[in-house]
Image (tube, grey):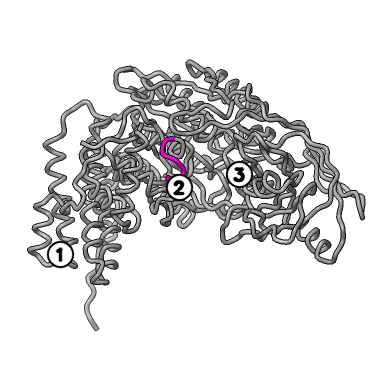
Amino acid sequence: MASRVRTSPVLIVLGVLAGSTLAAQQPEAKLPAETLLDRAVLTALDQELSGVAAKDHVSRLTQLHRVPASPGFHEAIAYVQGRATAFGLSDVHVETFPGDGATYFGTLHGNRGWRVDGGSLDEVTPEARRIISYDDVRLAVADNSESADVTAELVDVGAGAQPRDYDGKDVRGKLVLCDAVPSACHRQAVEQRGAVGLVSYNANQVSAWWRDDQDLIRWGHLDARGRRNTFAIMISLREARALQQRLGRGETITLHAVVRARNDDAMPYETLVATIPGTDASVGDVVFSCHLDHEKPGANDNASGCAATLEIARALKTLIDAKRIPPPVRTIRFIWPSEMTGTIAYLTKYPDIASRIRAAVHLDMVGADPFITKSILHVTRSPWSIATVTDDVEETFGRYVIDGAFRAAADGEMTHAIRSHGGSKDAFWADITPYQSGSDHWIYQEGGFGIPAIYLRDHPDIYIHTTGDLPDNIEPTKIKRSAFIAAASGYYLATMPDRGESLIALSYANAHARLAEDGRRAIAMAADRARGRDAEIIVSQAVLREQRRLRSVSRFLRVDASAHLDRLSAGLADAGTSLLLTFMAPDAAAALARAGFRQPAADARVPVRAASVKGPLDPRGDWLVDKAGSAAAALAIARVPRSDDITYEIVNFIDGARTVSEIRDAVSAEFEPVDLKAVADYIDLLARAGAVTFK
């Protein structure tokens, strides 16, 4: 039997006391977020932000049918304006822009204003019954419908967007039952074949749950600039299937459609603006943005983003006035526009303000309970063309909330758990994701403006754009967590209390993680020997992206950190070279690194963007078609997968320094390899349209 060493009880007690004293002397280690904002500031934001208050705003906004440039949207503007004024925000005012369907805002064509007072669809024969009414369902009348009172036979044309859908069917003077986007069906059925109107069951956005709920009714749209519009009545998939079965059995069904609506070119777009003034007007602004327009109810999309923005404004103003957090150095600007059009209209009207905006924080769908809507909150990175340290800001605060929620749910450790009174204690269904388009951040980050944008978004949401997007889907803790990430990110960028040192360090650390992501993709591509050069381009462009990202900190600093940034950039180059060595010969990898990770240029022309052209330049967009002709939509680049994003980035990469070949390499690394000729043809078209010139 081994001998035991007995320890005196006195020594045990002394040891415990000594350990307790040592533990008391050791401060708790800082979390990455606490290197950007003091723990006291993060605590103050947590204590002041209210998910319940934000949900109350959602409930109010969802009572309004918030179609752009409509009386319902005006009511929503008035509500937010009243609350912003009551919270004591400065310079609370409404900007107006023409809703005539003719005005261009930058390169985006504005829509027509619209008023709707009612509508209904009834079956007359063989069974007299009410099918749907605007009084019950605001989505019953598709946007931009015109008044009508029609009794007509119903004809089923299936999808209804292609000429073949009408083979053997006489729709003249009849109502058409169709599935495709109402504006496309209207062109075929009404404008070309003389139908009197549409009965549409166009379904929700495609997802794994698409069409599972047959009782949803989708928000429909006719041409928002159309001068030949009649009307579309929106019905559920269940109702449509029942009508189709009856028609298939040979029944003749007569319907009575009534619409009380009109397109109103005098109804303006409205954008609400408010500020919290900064202490130094010379260092620019930080913007909080959300789009206020949507159908009734439109709870998550996007009453949630606008409600969260309103609650952020209240919380920041309250904390600053109470001196619980320092006042911002930069002015904080809050903007509630209609989606895309309202944002670009504001930025093009006030180029001096646009030039002062250092970053935008955009919230579009941020409150949905994932157990109801299947939504995940995505903290979304910027496109490669505008690689920016704001990605590191949102990622740092995003991980702070994600990790704190996980520890609380898993271990009951509530120290860093952001949650709302009465809200969920669940882990946070959220992640950090690559760039995705689809909201107003797309305008801010467009090359004509070049404004870094933080983007928070729920996706998917199985109820988006339907009658199912209800306030009951909004979960107070979820919307508070989203608001916290946004508020902390925007407030940090408005104050920069650490003068950027911590941000540079975090960005450098994050850069290696992002390079690892790209390295894995490149290694998989290099497994196919024929795609070795594309693998080299992925790593090379990723290194250049991260080096640009580090240097982007100068947008926010008033000190010269160039020497330090040069050293860190060299470290990123070394990391990139190491990745290249996993699939390249050492001499070839070293040569590529010495060349600054730039490949030889097969097309060495250098395009320069016209400074006066602001906004996206989609080949199928009205601006480019007007300037360059209908051939624009037939370009090869318009037919590649994700062509919208690829053409957006091609234009963004035009900086007066990159060659056409380098632009091709940049978009190929970000998405998938793109043919050089397709890129060159698109840039040539831009030149013919006057959007670019060549050096």
Circle 1 crowding by C-alpha within 10 Å: few under 14, some 14–19, many from 20: some
Residue 49 in the figure: left or right of residue 372: left
Mark 2 and mark 3 lie on one chain; the one further toward the N terminus is 3
Pointer 1: what residue?
A: 581
Q: CA distance from mark 3 to mark 1?
A: 49 Å
Residue depicted at x 26% and y 66%: 531
Q: Quarter-wise, where is residue 1 in the image?
A: bottom left
Tell me the crowding category of disc 3: few under 14, some 14 to 19, or many 20 or more residues within 10 angstroms, Cα based. Answer: many
Q: Nearer the viewer, residue 339 or 79?
A: 339
- The residue located at (47%, 43%) in the rendering is 630
Q: Which residues are magenta?
A: 627-632
Residue type at the position of mark 1: Leu
Q: Identity of the amino acid at label 2? A: Ala
Q: Nearer the viewer, residue 203 or 395?
A: 203
Q: Is residue 203 above or below residue 286?
A: below
Name the disc covering residue 132, or none. Answer: none
Q: Secondary structure at mark 2?
A: helix
- Residue 19 point in image, percent of width and height: 27, 51
Quarter-of-image position of residue 323: top left
Mark 2: few/some/many CA within 10 Å (<14, 14-19, 20+) = some
Residue at which label 2 appears: 633
Where is 625 relative to 589, above or below? above
* Residue type, mark 3 in image: Ile
Q: What residue is at 35 percent from the left and 46 percent from the top?
A: 682
Pick whichever of labels 2 and 1 is earlier in the sequence. 1
Q: In whole angstroms, how far apart are the C-alphas of marks 2 and 1?
A: 41 Å
The residue beneath circle 3 is 474
Closer to the N terminus: mark 3 or mark 1?
3
Q: Can you give x and y, in whole percent of width and height, for residue 163 in the image?
A: 64, 56
Closest to the observer, 673 or 167: 167
